[in-house]
Image: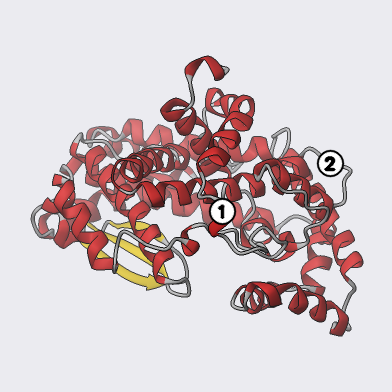
Amino acid sequence: MLHKIKKLGLKKVYNQSILNYKKDRITPDIDKVQKIILDSHKEAINKYKELKPPITCSIDTYVDIWIKKAISLDVATLAVKTASEYPPDFFKGSIDFFTVFPHEEINKLHGKIYDAPLDERHKIWKLYFTNSSKISLPKLEQLFIRIPKEKVAFSKSKGFKNDTDMFIDRYKIPNIDYNFFLKNIDDVIKFCNGHIPEGKDLPTNFYSEFSSVCYMCNQNQFPFDNIAGVQSYFENNFKLIKKFKNKINIVFGEKSEMTYIKETDTFQISLYSKQNNRHKMSDLIHEFCHVENYLEIMSKNINPFNIGRYTREKEAIKLELKILKKDFSGLYKSMLGSILGTFQRVLFELELSNQSNMLPNKLYAKCFNKCYLSQKQKSNFSYLIEPNIILNHYFLFPYAVAYVNILSLQNIVRENVVFS
């Protein structure tokens, strides 16, 4: 089979595939890998002939996408299997935590709290633990404290210093960008605080413990009336979006994301169905930026999946901020406020990874105050129902690093920036 791979000019793809398995500490099954590559190559060639024009990329790029996606799926499947082989005691803290506070309960309580008016949210939280026969809030926090330690231990078992180091590798974040993030995040926080909407238009408890701190929802006006308006903006301002508009489908689902569907050479933008229309439209702007970047990359005969998640997010954010700053200044300022919320969550996770001795509720409040400079929270338990902390560890990490790198270079006076 290797001879056939060489004959088809896929030796470089094969070598890279082997490295991908080894990178995840997986011993590759050579025959299986070769079969995946050859089968994917054959399927891609046949599918390419059936694609409806206009086609987004060359046949070589299309074949590469098919192979890389198939290999990535196999690596991910084997990685999950490997993790499941760890002894139960290795994750005992996580097991104990989710036994008394399962995923379904977290999502249910999160929805109940954030669907309620702002001044009722803390009452709902307090009532939940008053009526809970399973566990008290202090005991639940003690169970949570064990989870970050287990995650660090898990990352060390994979050969990394800690889980931050592991996710830098997974998201392909360049060290220069991460170091720049650490050195310049304080300057970016100051910049964001200096440009967010003024407090006189905000509710008095806007910065309370269970507030979502959303400036966008508190704007008097919004630049778009509906999703069709966002779509029209991109079709009128971006030639590639206009050219391939019939290959972009918008649906509603469990989360907001953009997916390239290789079988049909189309882009599917999914918008989180349970959020309000403003958030749907805001997410749509971001996902359209992804589509534009994918189309640009693919037009240059480059497979976008050869680029790490960090770089893909960074390029989309760069375009998004450029659009908002140029055409929608009110939404741009609101986004700066949302960026501060991202920083709060990521700084919290970094502190946990560094084995902070503070109680998590005190630490989360400290991170809140660091990001929203005028605030003086003393305690914040909302991290316990924050999906991107509890259920989706380090999900926001690449966004935070990208925000600092982009905003530093776009907005902050060069003399005030410490370059790596």
Position of the N terminus by quadrant: top left
Mark 2, other Cα within 10 Å: few <14 / some 14–19 / many ≥20 = some
Q: Which residue is disc 1 drawn over?
A: 78
Residue depicted at x 70% and y 41%: 370
**Tag on residue 356?**
2
Q: Position of residue 237 (x, y in %)?
A: 17, 47
Specify the color scheme: secondary structure
207 to 62, vertically: above or below: below
Question: Is residue 368 found left or right of 195 in the rendered image?
Answer: right
Q: Looking at the image, which residue sits at the far top?
A: 415
Instruction: Indicate the secondary structure of the residue bearing disc 2.
Output: loop
Q: Nearer the viewer, residue 397 or 203?
A: 203
Distance (Cα) linking label 1 and label 2: 33 Å
Q: Is residue 90 visible?
A: no
Q: Who's the residue at 79% across and 80% down the image?
A: 128
Q: Which mark is residue 215?
A: none
Q: Mark 1 belongs to which amino acid?
A: Leu
Residue for point 24% across, 33% down: 9
